[in-house]
Image (tube, rainbow, N blue to C red):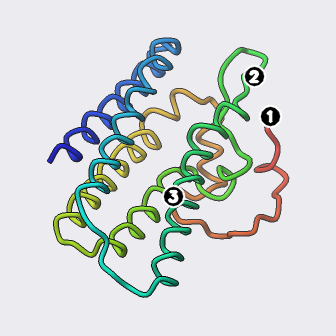
Amino acid sequence: MTAVFLCTIGFIILLFSDLLQVWKKEISAKILAPPGYLMITGGMIILISSFSPVPRPPIIFATQIILAVLFALLLIYSVLVEIPLYSRKSESSKRKAIKSGTYSFVRHPGFLWFLLLHLLLISIYRNRWFTLNSLFMVLLDFILVFLEDRFFFPKIFPNYREYMKNVPFLIPNRIFMTKKKDASEDE
């Protein structure tokens, strides 16, 4: 239960961080977000360390671990590296939604990597309680990205509604991107 509690508090903190951005309190939002991410990470570490993986052939287990690490790294990259790396402000000092990199094939790639990571972990642990806790964490993330997508980001990013027309919400409709003229330009 500690893992779920920490993740729940972490996602609530991220929700408040988004609200602060809507209210133009960007510095407060930047201060609030890291503890949210740390609580989610801590909750996941507690969840993973509370259960034992189900034995299976070493090659299958190694493949699952490698894929889990890959999705964890993609999650870290999309959420913690790519956003600060490519964030821009327009001439009017308003922030713009990122339309390149992993954000060019889905609007919330972090959710996609989080989901795939949890599905792999579920297949590694094969435990009912682990699965329920893990799926609850994914549900919390889905609620956050849904609220961001529908209510917060259109108020934070002036180009978000156009971005929504060009890039799918969560399920990529193309993996290998062929650049569209309007979707590839970071205005």
Percent position of residue 97, x then y: 65, 36
Q: Which residue is mark 1?
A: 187
Q: Say if 129 sits above or below 140 in the image.
A: below
Which of these two is toward me, 92 or 36? 36
Q: Amino acid at mark 1?
A: Glu
Q: Earlier in the sequence, mark 1 or mark 3?
A: 3
Q: Which residue is mark 3?
A: 113
Give the label, 3 or 2, closer to the camera: 3
Q: Earlier in the sequence, mark 3 or mark 2?
A: 2
Which of these two is toward me, 39 or 25? 39
Location of residue 167 by image quarter? bottom right
Mark 3 secondary-structure assignment: helix
Q: Identify the residue shown where x is 53% and y is 65%.
A: 171
Percent position of residue 55, x then y: 33, 81
Q: Quadrant of the C terminus?
A: top right
Q: Amino acid at mark 2?
A: Ser
Q: Residues within 10 Å of mark 3 (few under 14, many from 20)?
A: many
Q: Which mark is residue 90?
A: 2
Is label 1 in contact with label 3 (beta carbons under 8 Å)? no
Is label 1 in contact with label 2 (beta carbons under 8 Å)? yes
Q: Say if 71 sits above or below 9 in the image.
A: below
Percent position of residue 9, x then y: 25, 34
Q: What is the C-alpha distance between the residues marked 3 and 2?
A: 29 Å
